[in-house]
Image (cartoon, rainbow, N blue to C red):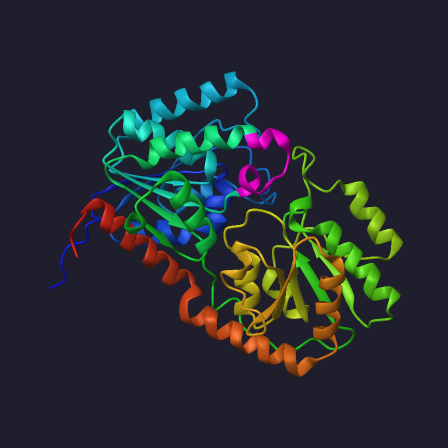
C-alpha cells in the first residue's frame, strides 16, 4: 500500500502577477498537487495583459483551483498602489492560512516573502521565473532600486522554512551569492516544461526556409536585432523568410508599438503574423527558431517548445537561453545585441538542412530527457515535500 502523500489536505496558495501566466506556465504543477490531495488557491490580478481574448478565470475554477483577485501593479511606481497590494496580500494570507505559499515572479516574491515571515506562514517556495528588467536593465534608476530589492529578498529568504527555485544556473548564482542564501535550500528546475505529445518533430516545410521569433513583442526580446538581421540577410541575397509571431500591448512601455510592427511588415523586412495560439503548427512551419533576447530570462517557454518540435535554435548567449541551448549541440548561441552574428547564424542554418536536422534531433532528445511538463511538475512537488517535511527523505 502506497504511503499517504505529504500534500494530502495541504492548502497551497500560489501568488502570481498574472492569472494567464499561471495557467499557461504552472497549471501542470497545480494539477499534480490536486491529484495528490492538495487544496489549491491562486491569487493574481484580473487584468490579463498578455492573455488571449478567449481566456476566462472560470477555467481555473473548473480545474479545481480557487481564484482570488489581487491588485498588483506591474510598474510599481505608485506607493499607494504598492500599499494596496501589501494590505490585500495580508488580508488574503490571514483568510486562507496556507500551509504552503508558492510565490511566482519578482514582486510576489518580494512582498509575499516579507509577509510570510511576519504572518508566520509555515512553508514558502519562491520561484524565480527570471531576474527580469530590474537586474538586466541598464537604466541608472535601476541601480538605485536593486539594493532595495535585494534587501527585501534577504528578508523573505530568511524565513525559517523556505526553498528557492531558479530556472537557470546563472540566476541561481546571482541571487544565492547576493542574498547569502544557503545553496542546499535552492534548486534549478529548467522552466515550465513542454507538452511532448503536442510539440513533436515533423518534416521540414517545403519552400523558402522560415526563421521564426515568437514572443511577447517587447524590445528586450531582441525584436530590433531580429529585424536588422532580416535586412542583412536580404542584402546578402539569402533565401530565408523572417517572421515575427506575437502581440504587443500599449500599457507596457517596453512593448514594440503596433505602428512599428506594421511599418516593418510594409517595408518587407519581416512578416508579422500577430498572436497565434496554435504554436505547434507555427513551429512545424519553421526551419529555425530565434530568440535574440537581452532580457533577464528564466528559461523561455518557446525554446522548450522548439526543442520538443525538433527545430534548430539560434539564441543569445545569456543565462536563460544557455540553460537549454548548447552551442553546436542543439542550436547556436550568439552574442546579445549583435544582428550581424544573428544573421550569419540564421543564414548558415537556413542553407544547411542536414545540420538543422542534427541540431533538432538533439533538442528533441533533451526535451524528452528532462523538459516534459510531467518531469517539471514532479520536480516541483519534490521541493514541496522537502519544505513541508524538512529533513524527511
Q: Which residue is found at the position 54% from the left and 50% from the top?
A: 297
Query: In terms of depth relative to the viewer, which is nearer, 101 or 339?
Result: 339
Q: Does 334 sit above or below residue 100?
A: below
Q: Is residue 79 left or right of residue 264?
A: left
Query: In terms of depth relative to the viewer, which is nearer, 333 or 382?
Result: 333
The picture quadrant where one finds residue 279 is bottom right
Q: Is residue 183 left or right of residue 301?
A: left
Image quadrant occupied by the C terminus: bottom left
Q: Does 130 sit above or below residue 195?
A: above
Q: Does 162 sit above or below residue 194?
A: above
Q: Position of residue 291 (x, y in %)?
A: 64, 58
Q: Is residue 353 left or right of residue 366?
A: right
Q: Position of residue 219 (x, y in %)?
A: 69, 45
Residue 81 visible in image: yes
Tell me where the magenta segment starts and ends, as one range. 132-143
The picture quadrant where one finds residue 88 is top left
Which secondary structure dominates the residues rendered in magenta?
A: helix
Amino acid at each position: 500500500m502506497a504511503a499517504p502523500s505529504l500534500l494530502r489536505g495541504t492548502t497551497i496558495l500560489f501568488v502570481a502577477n498574472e492569472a494567464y501566466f499561471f495557467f499557461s506556465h504552472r497549471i501542470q504543477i497545480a494539477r499534480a498537487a490536486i491529484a495528490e490531495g492538495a487544496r489549491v488557491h491562486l491569487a493574481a490580478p484580473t487584468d490579463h495583459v498578455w492573455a488571449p481574448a478567449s481566456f476566462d478565470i472560470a477555467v481555473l475554477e473548473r480545474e479545481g483551483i480557487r481564484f482570488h483577485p489581487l491588485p498588483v501593479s506591474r510598474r510599481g511606481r505608485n506607493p499607494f498602489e504598492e500599499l494596496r497590494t501589501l494590505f490585500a496580500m495580508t488580508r488574503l494570507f490571514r483568510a486562507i492560512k496556507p500551509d504552503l505559499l508558492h510565490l511566482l515572479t519578482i514582486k510576489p516574491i518580494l512582498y509575499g516573502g516579507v509577509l510570510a515571515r511576519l504572518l508566520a506562514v509555515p512553508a514558502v517556495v519562491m520561484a524565480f521565473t527570471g531576474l527580469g528588467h530590474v537586474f538586466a536593465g541598464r537604466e541608472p534608476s535601476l541601480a538605485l532600486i536593486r539594493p532595495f530589492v535585494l534587501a527585501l529578498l534577504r528578508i523573505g529568504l530568511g524565513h525559517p522554512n523556505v526553498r528557492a527555485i531558479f530556472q537557470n544556473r546563472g540566476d541561481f548564482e546571482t541571487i544565492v551569492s547576493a542574498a547569502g542564501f544557503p545553496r542546499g535550500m535552492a534548486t534549478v528546475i529548467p522552466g515550465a516544461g513542454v507538452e511532448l505529445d503536442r510539440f513533436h518533430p515533423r518534416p521540414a516545410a517545403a519552400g523558402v526556409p522560415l526563421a521564426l521569433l515568437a514572443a511577447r513583442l517587447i524590445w528586450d526580446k531582441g525584436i530590433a536585432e531580429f529585424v536588422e538581421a532580416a535586412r542583412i540577410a536580404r542584402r546578402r541575397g539569402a533565401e530565408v523568410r523572417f517572421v515575427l509571431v506575437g502581440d504587443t500591448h500599449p500599457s507596457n512601455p517596453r512593448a514594440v508599438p503596433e505602428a512599428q510592427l506594421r511599418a516593418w511588415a510594409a517595408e518587407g523586412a519581416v512578416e508579422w503574423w500577430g498572436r497565434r495560439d496554435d504554436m505547434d503548427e507555427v513551429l512545424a512551419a519553421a526551419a529555425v527558431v530565434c530568440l535574440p533576447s537581452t532580457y533577464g530570462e528564466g528559461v523561455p517557454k518557446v525554446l522548450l517548445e522548439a526543442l520538443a518540435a525538433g527545430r534548430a535554435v539560434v539564441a543569445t548567449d545569456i543565462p536563460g537561453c544557455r540553460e537549454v541551448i548548447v552551442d553546436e549541440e542543439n542550436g547556436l548561441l550568439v552574442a546579445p545585441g549583435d544582428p550581424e552574428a544573428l544573421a550569419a547564424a540564421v543564414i548558415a542554418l537556413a542553407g544547411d538542412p542536414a545540420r538543422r536536422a542534427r541540431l533538432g534531433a538533439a533538442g528533441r532528445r533533451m526535451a524528452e530527457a528532462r523538459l516534459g511538463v510531467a518531469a517539471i511538475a514532479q520536480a516541483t512537488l519534490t521541493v514541496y515535500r522537502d519544505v513541508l517535511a524538512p529533513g524527511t527523505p
